[in-house]
Amino acid sequence: MADTSLSQTEARSAPAAPPRVGRIAGILHRNETLRGYLLMSPTMLIMTIGILVPFLILLVMSFWTREGFGFDTTLTAHNYTRVWNEPIFGALLQRSFWISGVATVVTVALCYPMAYYVAFHVHRNKMMWIILMTLPFWTSYLLRVFAWKVILGYQGVINSGLMSVGVIEAPLEFLLYSQTAVIITLAHAWAAFAILPLYVSLEKIDKSLLEAATDLGDGPMARFFRITLPLSMPGIIAATFLIFIPTTGDYITPALLGGPDGAMIGNFIQLQFGAINNWPMGATLSIVLMLWISAIALVFLFVTRKAQERIA
Amino acid sequence: MSDQGTYIKRPNRPLQIYAMVFLFVLYLPILFIPMFSFNDSIYVRFPLQGFTFQWYGELWNRQPVWNALWNSVKVGAVVAVISTILGVVAARAITRYRMPGKSALVTFIMMPLVIPGIIFGVALLVLMSRMGVPLSLYTVTLGHLIVCLPFAVATLLPRFEGFDPSMEEASADLGENGWWTFWRVTFPMVMPGVVASLLLTFTISFDEFIMAFFLTGTDPTLPMYIWGQLRFPQEFPSVLALSSLILFVSFILVFVAQWIGRLGLDKDT
Amino acid sequence: MTTSDGFISIRHVNKFFGSFQAIEDVSMNIGQGEFFSLLGASGCGKTTLLRMLAGFESTSSGEIYIDGQPTSDVPPHHRPVNMVFQSYAIFPHLNVRDNIAYGLRKQKLPKAKRDEMVEEMLELIKLPGYGQRKATELSGGQRQRIALARALILRPKVLLLDEPLGALDKQLREQMQLELRALQRQVGITFVFVTHDQEEALTLSDRIAVMSGGKVLQVDTPAGLYETPKTREVASFIGNMNFFQGTVRRNGAAMGAVETEGLGHIPVPLDQLTKPDGAPVQVALRPEKFELSPTRPEGALHAVEGRLSNAAYLGERSHYYVSIAGKDQPIAVSTQNLGRMTGAPDISGDAPMWLSWAPEAIVILDADETG
């Protein structure tokens, strides 16, 4: 039957000389690294045009100064000395980091039990839960902030709701245009950035480690602090970074909800490129913000690394 | 599942309640938007005044809304296609080749995820003005591309990591060159990731505001249009109606994208 | 089926991954129609060598010829070889028929002809009528057969198999071994088979290359490898082996002799003795070459008395460990359990036990320091 058709004599007859490929194709065939870089190059080109080049120009511009409606392109550290000497800039930076810091801590703390619940106590439809928890994050940031304006506003949902049921007589004024409003909104808007890394790090924990801890005499609390929490540290660190860094530069939330007390460095940068029209100063502030973020991130990494070594 | 109901995983009632409250609070603020969009009052406040489609009807007849919508769709479609193609290419390179400096490249691509958007926005604005490029939908598209690329790569990477490299080798071994191998094996196998990436990047671009804020010329995208309307309290209800529609579409697109994107990746479903 | 030398010819091939040398100066010939195995522990370079034949890894130096043609610059999709992958690499988005017909695209066959060829292959692998099945519905053994059919339908000059039976359970593996061997005889294609399982290699192969640390230690027939290993490494990798230190003492014309640790002055056939008088050597004897008896066996050329120190009953055979004076490690002995075994052997160390063997069973190896 089938066997007769497959004898060696009928084996696939290759041409006398196997087809030789071209010189360049030959090099590519042999050099895997080169092929990889070639494949990466279009993406890298876009990223270079979109990130690297603009950033370098921003860096150069930060050493320029404003001159009427144009720029004085002589390089000078004038803007940096201003940022260093005038207290308004330092105060704004400090406030930005304070608001972001509080929002970050609140978000991570509130999201941790949620991530823990899905990682350890949800057995069916885990995927559904993850999608449910992260879905709002994908919708417009502007609209989510807007939603909080609707809720916290002077005549907003909370005030009008409480007044219509008679709990309060006059609207609560501290709700809108305050740091609290900004912190609440940031925590809500960035929850997905905390949940995902926390969930991933918790899910990765080998359940038999927890059973081992229990077997060796740990109660639920001791087990949590001695096993679960240390092992989920990478997730906590990632979540902290993912929230703290982007929120320090946020300007939509403070613009809509912050009022004068809640303005952050992002609003000030935006003003330099807008109403104040001092682009070099805006560039300087952007660079200073980046430097501060990097410095804080490094210190945070160093401290957590040390703390982990202490525990281990 | 075999480990269901083990000692470690036994039900925890307080945690369960917390989870429910968490989800409720997560969705509540967004639910107020559609709720008040049907409210028959120009004031967004309790008590509700009655049900109306008036605000939606007003939207329908407003030409600037349609223009802004069309702008957003154009930008979103272009951004989705380009960032997904670049994402496929990059994800393939990252997973298949030994490259020195690979992790640095990946970090570079993922940077827009963690750096404040305002910095990219002003940096691109400065670049464009120095090069004399007028702000337009093209500059917005470039800005959105930067924002969307990390998401495209992050969506596609697990797909490429998830499939056995010997699949592609088997195709080469059976006589197909790189081009045909890609279309006959690689692409069909990463297809769910590609669809997910297209939907996600479209949604992100469609909803994006920060980049658009700095890079929009005279043609506004939909979020820019909304931002402009927020100054006028009398426009609040129609903004609510428009926002409800955007939220609705975004939710559907993202839900489908997430569902498709995770198909076959999680073993526990 | 003739075995002509050098259908596949591997010439001084080296392979470096960075500074790690995966393949070290490997040269060998594989004949047409041969069932050839690359045997070694994981990390020995056998899979790298196979992937070089397929074209997935380039050679750092040296050349591989297939049917007389150098292959360095030929990409995998132009090579007249096909591979059965360790994971089988069955395309999950295609059904069985499309998986098997995958490589036929370029031949632009009419659909009817293509389907006929696929059905022929399905019969060959004993899965007729499976064409419409989804790839994801197949069992391990079925996937393995589909992978075979997918490669064989292209009638390659060489079929490469990368541990194709590794993922199957023991019973299925043994059945597939028989089928694979029969299939290879049927189609007459050269098979190059990678495995870490020595029993599998012995069962299947015409010839076996034993590899270790990127080098080929010995290429031989299964019987050749087992009965006359060239080095201690090969001897201990394939089956079990007892080793003794010895010194050559040539004293007769008919038989040579070796002064051996623990065994004394033992006769050895002359053809085993290539070393001069007084040279240090190793004497190797497989466990099943010994005969055990409670008294000194009559008619044996040489016998040694020892004490039984341990025993294990394995059903069809038993393993014994016999301690003898002058050697630290006990000697491993394996015997067929021909009669019914009753009671446990006396391992108290009091019972004397005599060891004897045929001089022809002895293998003499070069001395090594690790001894």
Image (spheres, rainbow, N blue to C red):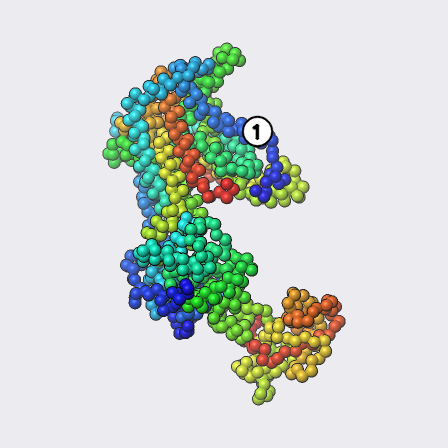
Q: Residue at x 60, y 33 (%)?
A: B12
**Residue closest to the far bottom:** C253
Instruction: Mark yes or no: residue A286 visible.
Output: no
The local secondary structure at tag 1 comes to helix
Horizontal side of C215 relative to B128 (left or right) equals right
In percent of width and height, residue A131 lies at 47, 35
**Is residue C143 positioned above or below C222 on the image?**
above
In percent of width and height, residue B74 lies at 30, 33
The subunit letter for the residue under badge 1 reads B
**How many marks can you see?**
1
Q: Residue at x 62, y 72 (%)?
A: C287
Image-quadrant location for residue A48:
top left
Q: Residue at x 33, y 62 (%)?
A: C73
Image-quadrant location for residue A220:
top right
Which residue is nearer to you in this view: A293 or C217? Answer: C217
Instruction: Mark yes or no: residue A157 visible.
Output: yes
Q: Amino acid at mark 1?
A: Ile
Horizontal side of C362 relative to C20 (left or right) equals right
Q: Residue at x 61, y 75 (%)?
A: C289
**Is residue C317 positioned above or below A208 on the image?**
below
In percent of width and height, residue C143 lies at 47, 55
Q: Which quarter of the rendered picture does the C terminus of chain C lie within?
A: bottom right
Q: Which quarter of the rendered picture does the N terminus of chain C lie within?
A: bottom left
Image-quadrant location for residue B123:
top left
Residue to which mark 1 is pinned:
B17
**Is residue A254 positioned above or below B40 on the image?**
below
Horizontal side of B101 relative to C220 (left or right) equals left
In percent of width and height, residue C217 lies at 49, 70
